[in-house]
Image (cartoon, rainbow, N blue to C red):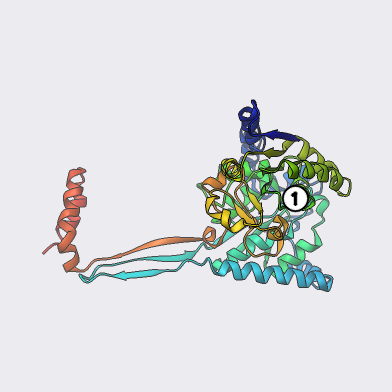
Amino acid sequence: MLYINSSDENFSKAFDELMGRGKVDIDQVSKIVKDLIDEIRQDGDNALAKHIDKFDKWQLSSTKDLSIDPDLMAKAYKNLDEKLKASLHLAYDRIKAYHEKQLPKSWLDFEPNGTILGQKVSAVDRAGLYIPGGKAAYPSSLLMNAIPAIVAGVEEIVVCTPTPQNEPNELLLAALHLCGIKKAFKVGGASAIAAMAYGTASIPKVDVITGPGNIFVATAKKMVFGDVNIDMIAGPSEIGILADESANASHIAIDLLSQAEHDEMASSILITPSQKLASEVKDEISKWLNKLDRKEIASRSIEERGAIITTNSMSESIDLMNSIAPEHLEVATDNAFELLPYIKHAGAIFLGHYTPEAIGDYIAGPNHTLPTGATAKFYSPLGVENFMKKSSIISFSQKAINEVGGMAALIAQTEGLDAHAESILTRLS
């Protein structure tokens, strides 16, 4: 684990190395992914069967095996423990309520001369959701991806998720039922992205693909972008924490580990002006690690991609964190809301001592599909607008085109586009 002060002589070099630790090296897997995509485009379901046999270690008896039977979803939902079922419903309701506030609106603006300008907002016809299922299953990701699509009004939602050994996760099946998903397929990795982007006999082509995944999924999404829309190219999970002497060291330590247990590539960073807190958190991490089932994964993540940085002031801490632009940012101070105006770049911001990042993963309401690898500087969390698009509305009256048409035609003539100019001038009176 990197443990360093911002005043140290070698700090700039160490910080730059830290910034590069979580970068997804797409180039190293690009050829592998391109070959997988080409196989799906050329051989459809047959290629999917080959990839499932190779990566998920089970064989299709027929292409019908690709689909997850909605009856299995309903059965899994029915068999849920009642407390867990209530928790899922609470999560669903809170996520839905939050995303309903995001709905963009169509509008028209009427000018006195008869010009009408506006915007029409509509949902895409079909959305593809990728839900990871390798080292762990993530029903929460299904909720976070499906609910914004439902709120947007998408007519058809397609889900792909890997099922190693052909054993779908029961909680994921229940979440599929809760979300009303009818088309779900047991396909993972780059193969799933290609299938949704280009379509096969079994899996329909979609208009937008969302959802997190490993480096192969991220690379595939980058490669199919343009043929379909995507939400973002997400890398390993990250958490950044800004804290001062008012923070609870044990809380900070377990919050850092909450990301480290995702996978070995996850990044967990504390930046604080308090040397005392930094030292205490370092000790608490060691204590917590021994209690975790995923100790091996978390330990490697913390050791290779974790950091505790001490600074001379909270202002300096914030500047460094803005440079990192973390996926998740906790502000563990008594005056968290006072610091909010100075935070420029983060996927999601968790304010105060009682707002752990994990509450946002499941039940707070905002989406947990977030930009990683400093892309929070220009990407936003997944939301309703990822499943919608806008059309411009333009209508001119005779009076309106008479008023401005000549100037539009002049610009067209200057560009050397005579037909453009004439299409306007012939309408003037």
Asked if residue 425 lies left or right of residue 169, the reply is left
Q: Which residue is mark 1?
A: 252
Q: Quadrant of residue 384?
A: bottom right
Quadrant where the N terminus sits is top right
- Which residue occupies the foreground of this view, 306 or 188? 306
Dot 1: element = helix
Q: Residues within 10 Å of mark 1 (few under 14, many from 20)?
A: many
Q: Is residue 420 visible?
A: yes
- Residue 124 lies, in percent from the top left, at 51, 62
Q: Quadrant of residue 69?
A: bottom right
Extreme-right residue of the structure: 290
- Which residue occupies the foreground of this view, 116 or 126? 116
Q: Amino acid under label 1? A: Ile
Q: Quadrant of residue 72?
A: bottom right
Asked if residue 338 lies left or right of residue 389, the reply is right
Q: Is residue 155 visible?
A: no
- Residue 333 lies, in percent from the top left, at 66, 54
- Residue 305 lies, in percent from the top left, at 72, 37
Quadrant where the C terminus sits is bottom left
In the depicted structure, whether residue 100 falls above or below residue 327: below
In the depicted structure, whether residue 71 falls above or below residue 326: below
